[in-house]
Every structure is written in C-alpha cells, then in structure tokens.
Amino acid sequence: MRGSNLRQYIDEFFDELVLYDDYYNGHYYKMLLKAGIDVFLDNENSYNAYEIYRTFFMIYQITAENKSDESKEISVVKEPNTLLDLVKIMKKYEENTGDLIEKQRDHFIHSVNVFLLGLAIYSQNKSYRDQFRQYVLKSPYEKYYMIDGEFSHEEFLYRWGVAALFHDIGYPVEIIGKQLKKFINDGIKNISSSYNADTAIDFKDFNEFNTIVKIEPDFADKYTEVYPKAKFLNLFKPTDIMAHKIATDFKSVDINQVIKHLDSFVDIMGDSGFIDHGFFSSILVLNSYGYLMQKYAKNHDFFFYPIVDSATAILLHNYYRNVLQKKPFELKALHPSQSPLAFLLILCDELQEWNRRPFGVKDKKRSHVNELLLDIDDRGMDVQYIVKEGSIGLGFSEDKEELLKNVLSIRSIFRLGLRIITDVAQDNIIKEIVHGETEAPDILLRNVENLAIQIHNQYVETTKQQYEEKIANGEEPDEEFMEKYNNLPSFDELTPQLKIANIRQARSIPVKLNIIGCELATQDDEREAILKFSKDEVLDLAIFEHREWCDEKIGTGWTYGKEKDVDNLITPYLVPWDDLSPDIQQYDIDPVKNIPNLMKSLGLKVVRTKIRLLTFEMHDFYSKYNKDAGHFDDLPDYIKYSNYKQTDFLVKIVSELGYDMVDIESSGDAVTSFDEDSIDYLAQREHNAWYKLKVNLGWKYDSVKDEDAKTNPNLVEWDLLDYETQEFNKRTFRNLPQLCENVGLKIVKN
C-alpha cells in the first residue's frame, strides 16, 4: 500500500469525474464543488461546510426548469430550495442548542466529512466501484448518469451526496430526546441513585409525519408496473416505500415483517428509551423529494430509484445493526452488493472521528482526533487517527474494528481487511489518560478559601524567589516584572476575579490528582502517602493547570495580546504551554509541587488510587512468571503507560460481563472466580486491546522479543497465539478477584 491522505484521494476522484451538465450544457459545476471542498479541507468550519451543501443542492436542485434541456426560456419566478432550507433549519438548531447539550458534536461538519471519506473510498477501491455499478445496472432504472453512453461516476456522486449529506438531518429529534432523558435522570439520581426514570418523545400523529404530500394520484403507477407487489403498498408513505426497498435488496427479509416493525418503530423507541435519528432523517428526505418530484420532475423514476436508494441507506445506517441483525430478521454482515450506499454510509459514519469537537468549541486542539492519515487501495484500508490533544477513549480502535467486522462484510472489498490505528502523542501521558469529574472531599470544600489563600501565598513566594535569583545572577528585572514584584498584594487585597481564580485552582486539586492516578485520603488510610510527585507528573499537571487557567481567562473576557493590559483584559500568556517562558511556567509548576503539603495542612494525604495500585499488583503478579519483567518503577515510560491503559481497559471489559469493580467496603458479595467462558472472553478482549495499543505505540511482530527494536512474537491475533501464551493470559483473570482484594477492591455482580 502507498501512503496517502484524504485530500489526494478526493483530487483523484474529481480527476476521473465528468458531470453531465458540464459536458453537454457548458456548466462548470465540478469546478465549483471541488473549490468548495478544497476550502473546507483547509478550514473545517460550519460556514465552509454550508458552502458545500449550497453547491451540491444548486447542481442537483429539482425545479421546473430542466437544466439538461437546451432551452432558451428563462423563468423569473423565485423557487425555494426546499432541500437547502431543511439543512438551514438543522444548522440553526444545532448552533442554538449546542451550549445546552453536553458534548454535542457538530453533525453538520461531520456529514460533510462523511461525504468526503466516501468519495475517497470510491476513488481508491475498484471492488466497491464495481459493486455500485452492478447494483445500478441490474435495477430497472434506466435514467442513470451516462457520458457518451457509458456509465458515469456522477451517478455515485448524486446518490452518495444525498445519503451522506442528509444522513443526520433528523438528529435534532435525538438531541431533544437525549437531553430530556439526561435532565430527568440526572435530576432524580441527584436525590437518590436508586431512582431511575425513562423518557421518550411521543408523536401525537406519526402518520401525518410519515406521509408524502399527494399532488399527482398516478405518482406511483410506473413503479407498480415494474414491481406488481408494490400495488398493495401505500407509495405515499415513506416507511412502506423503504420496507419494499429493503425486501427487494435483502431477499430473505419478509416485507410484511419490516412494514409492521417500521409502523411501530416510534412506539418501540419510546418503550426502549432510545431514538434512531436515521429513521427520522430518511422520512424527511422522502417527504422532501417526494413532494418536489411530483411537482417538477417529468420522470418519477428519479424518485423511486436513486432517491429511495439514498433514503433507505440513511435508514439502514443505524437500523441494520440495531434491528435487521437481530430477531426475527437475523441478517449477517452487510455485503456491498445488497446495498452499496448503506454499506459505505455505515463504514464512513463510524470512521469519521477526526476534528469532531463539542459544538461551539472553535479550537481544533480541543477535539479528540486532530488529524487523519488514510491508506486505501484495492487490497485494504488503514485508518490512522492522530491524537495530539484530549482523549479518544480506552479500547477505541479495537471496539471500532470489532463493530465494523460484525456489521459489514469488509473483506468483500478489502481482501486484507480494515485496520484502525490510534496514534497518541507519548510526550505527555496526560493527553490520553481519561479523567472525568472527581468529587472533592467535604473537608476540602469546607476549607477551599484557606487553600486559595495558601495558593496565593505560594505565588507571592515564587515571585520573590525569582527576584532574588535574577539579582544573584546579575540580571536586571524588566519593568513588567518589577511592577508585579513591587505590588504583591495580600489575598484580601486581590480583585474578586483573582480570588475566584485561586479558589478554582483549589477546587481542581482532586481532578488533577485523578489524572495521575492519585486521590485524597484521610491520614488513617493504610495506603502510603505520596509526598512528592515525579518530574513527569509535575509537568503533566502544570500543563493541565495552564489549560484551566486559559479557559478561565477566556471565559471571563480576556484576550491574547503581546503586551499585558489589565484594564482591557489583555494577556500575552494565552498561548500553548511550550510557548511560555520558564519563569511563567514556574507559576504553574510550584502550586502542583505543593499539593501534598497543602493537603497535609487539612489532615489529608495524597495516595495512589486503588485502580492504580491494581496496576502495580498485576505487574508484580506478571513478574512472578517472567523474571525479565523487572520492578515497575524501573520500566520505561511507554511500558508504564501501556500498563496503566491495560488496567483501565480491564475495568471496562469486566463491566461488559455485568460486573463492577468497587471498594472492598462497598455493599455486595465479592465474586471469587469467573467461569471458563468468561475467562476466555476477558482474555481475548484484553489481548486484542494490548495488541492494538502496541501497534499504536510503534511495535511490530517478530519471532524475537526486542524492547529496543519494539518487536514481540505475541503481536498476533488471539487465535494465532500458542496454547501456552493463551493460558498465561487467562491466568490473570483466574487470579483477578484475589489481586483486587490485595489492593482493597472487589468484583461484584452488577
């Protein structure tokens, strides 16, 4: 395979593309669409994403004028672009509700990226192109795009554009449902964790929504001539249309079962407490196009073949795995010959993870995946996510590969398969360790103002030390520093904003400790107190503190400027950590170093979390059977990091079998052993995660283990491991209950 990227593949797609209206009618539509895509790839924002929508739906707008006819008539009647109006509504809704919805991501930009990824795969993989072409040619549809009588790639561009750009158009329905559920459940669980309530959005009259406006009574006549069984269906009803399409494409599916399920799907979602936005998106597409086709199109085949194909793909991008792969349908992995658009939409929707950030967050560094490297050809597909800031989650690559393998027949177009790699920057472990909200002990909350005072006093002490060092080194302090030194206020003299800043810093101590695998405990806790952080831990937490400080400053109206101006809220320090001078970095480093002493003044101490202690315990257990393992403290940083990740992932996979790992004092009987099936499952999941992590860290397979060369003979799939190695992996899980007990944890049935 040759290395490449998304932009190059898209260039190759357009190099091979000839648009009908450009070729026959003198338009320059391809140039316009390509220009919009190039601008978007340079700067992925909503404005540039919207331009792609505008161009696409200008090229393929359905109006009374047939652009393909060389007509001299010019209409001055203004015709609304119904499809683009639908996009505007979604865009405005997301912008106006984004702040209310936790981690709500911009599906508008996401949809454009899904569209582009599909173009790249189509361009690079002949097997998929052949599957799509044969699918269109074997259908009764004869009006597909052709250039000089030959099948044109424009047929794919058109169908794929509708499917990809509209696949999330119904997402606001899901947003509302999720937010309602979160609000209700978070509210009652705040009272008691034993409470649980389910919520659902109910349609007063779903049939009204699930209806195409009828303009021409004979709209469906030609379709029923081709498919006589369809005359028993209501072809002004989107769910009936899609049920027939599914039964046509998937021969084993009973159309009546699909119709029954789709008719009751709103109630099923309500009863089950979930919302499938793809279901609503597909109906919106059919409603919109069904109306426009009746009003303007001379040939209604334009609706019943390409548009229904796109809309059904939108339905299937969630519905296939959530419904059709389960009883009573029980379909196997989707083959592209059955529904090439649905196959590609599922694949691209799952893979589109780069630059997806919470809505309203403008800084790309705040997203999970910052960059994407693609390697696609007829043999296989490598997707490499580059994570420079934030976190992508434990077991992400493994879980994504497993999902796609179960839902899609990947090897039908990629004979070497699909490989997903997560490349995490290793210079700063904080970037990948997942940390969430950490509750502060009551004693800290009751003394937060005293801690804030001590933090401020530390700032004063740091400034005085810097002054003394400058004088001792014969250095003349600059004017800004001397102004700061000569006006060091007491805590009482600080502005309200600065007081709050110190309080924020004090409150964040539990979160900082959680990042490095520590927590606060009382002095009588049996765990050993951490009196001093390692150099790497200090650096990690100092960088985190600087990020929090930047968020605080931006949130209170400060902006970047080369010269500090307190009156106008301008500071030169709103820059990345590496751009700060050592003197300024020290203001973040010193408070971090002082955390153990601060906590001691409250009668608390810093200790390792029991999950982190479990990491050490598991390494000691491993060392008993591998004399070359060495002491944990002597391991290279990347090996420590790998062990931390594996322990965190272990908690996750145990929960998949319905178990929780809790403090030994918690209620519930401890599980003392797992059955063999569970052990086998856990060992495979753990090995697959280890395998993926090693690959992400640059390791390769070799028959000889070499730490320096990063090679390992066990870097193969589980089924290729020898029996002895498999049993060695299983030994960990046979002993896991005891290992947990050794560090004050236990496993309980959830």
Image (cartoon, rainbow, N blue to C red):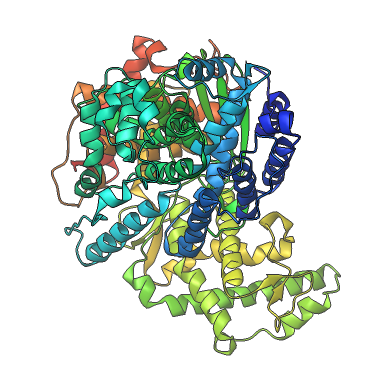
Q: Is residue 750 above or below residue 606?
A: above
Q: Residue furthest left?
A: 669
630 relative to 568 in the view: left or right: left
The image quarter in which residue 547 lies: bottom right
630 relative to 157 in the view: left or right: left
Residue occupying image coordinates x 49% and y 28%: 344
468 relative to 369 in the view: left or right: right
Give the number of callouts.
Answer: 0
Along the viewing direction, whichever of 578 and 345 lies nearer the viewer:
345
The image quarter in which residue 185 lies: bottom left
* Res. 697 visible in picture: no
Q: Residue furthest front?
A: 73
* Res. 67 visible in picture: yes
The image quarter in which residue 728 lies: top left
Q: Position of residue 503 (x, y in %)?
A: 49, 75
Q: Position of residue 209 (x, y in %)?
A: 32, 50
Q: Is residue 184 above or below residue 67?
A: below
Residue occupying image coordinates x 43% and y 39%: 394
Q: Quadrant of the N terminus?
A: top right
Residue occupying image coordinates x 30% and y 24%: 247
Along the viewing direction, whichever of 557 and 634 lies nearer the viewer:
557
Q: Position of residue 232 (x, y in %)?
A: 24, 29
Q: Position of residue 240 (x, y in %)?
A: 29, 35
Q: Quadrant of the C terminus?
A: top left
